[in-house]
Image (spheres, rainbow, N blue to C red):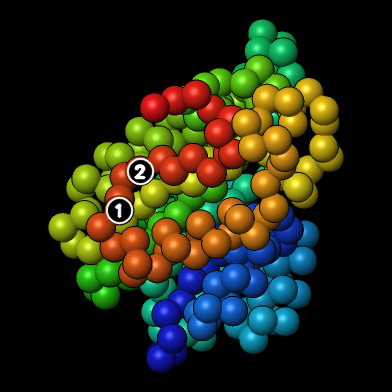
Amino acid sequence: MSDKQVVLIVGGGSGIGADSARALSEKGYDVAVMSSSGKGEALGNELGGLGFTGSNLVPADLEKFVSVSMDKFGRIDGVVNCTGHGPKGPIMEISDEDWHLGMDYYMMNVVRMTRLVLPIMQKQKNGSIVNISTFATFEPDPDFPTSAVFRASLATYTKLFSTKFAAEGIRMNNILPGFIDSLPEKEDRVARIPAGRYANVRELSETVAFMVSDASSYITGQNLRVDGGLTASV
């Protein structure tokens, strides 16, 4: 068994997921990184941990990722669930198939991974699950319709899960990023942000690392906005 805490990053081939893997590795965690592109496998190996190629849309891939991680490390202390961009388009033009795909992208990926790691975390009596969500969870943006709809559902799931398992030392929280510098910058979007700029991806990964760590041990069931003031919610 690893003498370090172990974090699994699902969807860690690029963007927030990849930089979170780097930040966690720098802070002394063992990391296992999964992505469908092969970039996550390369990154996990580069960081001296575990790399795995698979899709978070495929339950068997998630099962295998958890299995090989346990074989290598013997423990799972944290999970970071990331995802790519699902179906978009005018709300009344999205097909049934794309709505279902959006649910798989933005909600079921978390539900399925949580089922797999919960028994492990229950035996350890400790665990932190961090989901990368969106600023549009509570203030829907028509540019990201399926994301907004299903991540609002994810917020409800997170609250139900966190309430049930908090006494066992198992936490779940969502991070709600605004626009990140890994995306093309658009003037109209920058104009909406009080901070006047996109986030640097490391600003998100540092937040992820905090929410995974024991430093946030009394925080659970929350939706933490990291958006430069983009949303107006209080």
- 10 Å neighbourhood of mark 2: few (<14), some, or many (≥20)? some
Residue 225 shown left or right of residue 157 in the figure: right
The residue that appears at 50% across and 24% down in the rendered structure is: 232
Tell me residue 105's x, y (percent): 60, 40
Q: Mark 2 and mark 1 in contact (Cβ < 8 Å)? A: yes
Query: Farthest top residue?
Result: 92
The residue that appears at 30% across and 53% down in the rendered structure is: 219
Residue flagged by tag 1: what amino acid is it? Ile
Query: Farthest front residue?
Result: 195
Residue 185, quarter of the rendered image: top right
Residue 78, quarter of the rendered image: bottom left
Tell me residue 220's x, y (percent): 30, 50
The residue that appears at 49% across and 46% down in the rendered structure is: 175
Tell me residue 194's x, y (percent): 62, 31
Q: How far apart are marks 1 and 2 (CA)?
A: 7 Å
Query: Farthest left residue?
Result: 167
Where does the C terminus fall, quadrant-wise? top left
Is the residue 92 above or below the residue 163 in the image? above
- Residue 219 is marked as 1
Residue 121, quarter of the rendered image: bottom left
* Nearer to us in this view, 179 or 47: 179
* Nearer to us in this view, 221 or 234: 234
- Residue 222 is marked as 2
Q: Is residue 173 visible?
A: yes
- 10 Å neighbourhood of mark 1: few (<14), some, or many (≥20)? some
Residue flagged by tag 2: what amino acid is it? Gln
